[in-house]
């Protein structure tokens, strides 16, 4: 599990509350860095041993500046894909957002990814772009 340096104590407390903290290995990283800032030695040590990689990190702030949404949502997705590839991960799971549907009205499912919807904020646009990157550019299944 990747965790921001500033959130490590909170994560450790959460893991301890689960009763078996050894089930999860936490690695400190950063969405803004290549390979999420995970040290090369850690990547080398764990290459080929990770079956599922879940990308759930994003900035959820409709009022955040365009540049910050781009850096964390789009850049973070590219960095996550880079790390998953470097680790030779089995499957990459992108936890998306209903924001990728933009201003589409009505029932919406994953088969309707690009139905010509408008993307009214930079948050909507960056969540759509992140989803597009995973669908079209990922080298990891």
Image: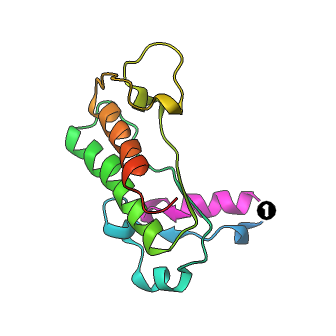
Tell me the quarter of the image containing the N terminus. Answer: bottom right
Q: Is residue 80 above or below residue 50?
A: above
> Horizontal and vertical percent for residue 59?
38, 43
> In the orientation shown, which residue stands out farthest toward the top?
106
Q: Is residue 94 above or below residue 105?
A: below
Color theme of the render: rainbow
> Horizontal and vertical percent for residue 58?
41, 46
Residue drawn at (42%, 50%) of the image = 134
Instruction: Choose between 27 and 141: the one closer to the eye.
Output: 141
Residue 14 is inside the magenta segment: yes
> Horizontal and vertical percent for residue 102?
37, 24
What is the count of numbered marks? 1
Q: Which residues are magenta?
A: 1-19
Instruction: Choose between 22 and 114: the one closer to the eye.
Output: 114
Residue drawn at (44%, 61%) of the image = 4
Residue drawn at (41%, 57%) of the image = 138
Instruction: Choose between 122 and 131: the one closer to the eye.
Output: 131
| Image side of residue 71 versus residue 90, left or right | left
Residue 123 is inside the magenta segment: no
Circle 1 is placed at which residue position?
Answer: 19
Q: Secondary structure at mark 1?
A: loop
| Image side of residue 102 versus residue 106, left or right | left
Q: Main secondary structure of the magenta part?
A: helix
> Horizontal and vertical percent for residue 122?
27, 33
> In the orientation shown, which residue stands out farthest toward the right?
19
Residue drawn at (32%, 49%) of the image = 74
């Amino acid at each position: 599990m990747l965790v921001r340096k500033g959130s490590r104590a909170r994560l450790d407390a959460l893991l301890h509350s689960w009763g078996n903290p050894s089930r999860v290995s936490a690695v400190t990283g950063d969405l803004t860095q290549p390979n999420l800032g995970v040290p090369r030695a850690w990547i080398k040590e764990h290459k080929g041993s990770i079956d599922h990689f879940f990308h759930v990190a994003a900035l959820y702030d409709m009022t955040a500046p365009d540049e910050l949404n781009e850096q964390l949502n789009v850049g973070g997705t590219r960095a996550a894909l880079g790390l998953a590839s470097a680790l030779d991960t089995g499957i990459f799971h992108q936890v998306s957002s209903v924001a990728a549907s933009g201003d589409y009205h009505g029932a919406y499912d994953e088969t309707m990814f690009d139905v010509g919807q408008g993307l009214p904020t930079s948050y909507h646009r960056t969540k759509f772009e992140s989803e597009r990157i995973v669908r079209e550019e990922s080298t990891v299944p």
